Image (cartoon, rainbow, N blue to C red):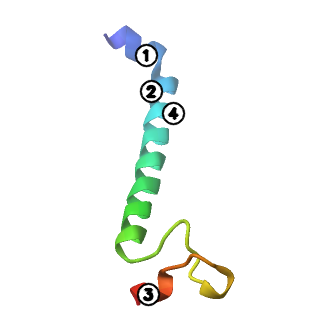
Amino acid sequence: MLSFLKANIGTIVVLLVVIAVVAAIIAKMVKDKKTGKSVVCGGDCSKCHGCTHSEIK
């Protein structure tokens, strides 16, 4: 087991960094969604024909 870790430490570190970045992105998206911000809606209802942003406020 120890030899496997030594042989693949670079790959394992990169994998952990990628997982951490993806988790942070997902957490930010969930937080933004809960506060009413959206990835899709920029909040400028004058340029949006199907926007419900003004109905939320």
Q: Crowdedness of circle 2 by 10 Å Cα count: few (<14), some, many (20+)?
A: few
Q: Which mark is residue 6?
A: 1
Mark-to-mark CA distance, 3 and 4 = 44 Å
Name the quarter where the C terminus is drawn: bottom left
- The residue type indicated by label 1 comes to Lys
Above or below, 50 relative to 1:
below
State which tag comes first along the sequence, 1 or 2.
Answer: 1
Element marked by disc 4: helix
State which tag comes first along the sequence, 4 or 1.
Answer: 1
Disc 4 designates what residue? 14
Q: Nearer the viewer, residue 44 or 4?
A: 44
* Closer to viewer: mark 4 or mark 1: 4
Element marked by disc 3: helix
Q: Which mark is residue 31?
A: none
Q: Nearer the viewer, residue 21 or 46?
A: 46
Can you tell which quarter of the image residue 47 is in?
bottom right
Is 43 on the left or on the right of 3, as rendered?
Answer: right
Q: Residue at 49%, 40% (x, y): give it.
A: 18
Mark-to-mark CA distance, 1 and 3 = 57 Å
Q: Crowdedness of circle 4 by 10 Å Cα count: few (<14), some, many (20+)?
A: few
Above or below, 42 relative to 8:
below
- Asked if labels 3 and 1 touch by Cβ distance under 8 angstroms, the answer is no
Disc 2 designates what residue? 12
Above or below, 38 relative to 5:
below
Q: Residue furthest front?
A: 50
Disc 3 designates what residue? 55
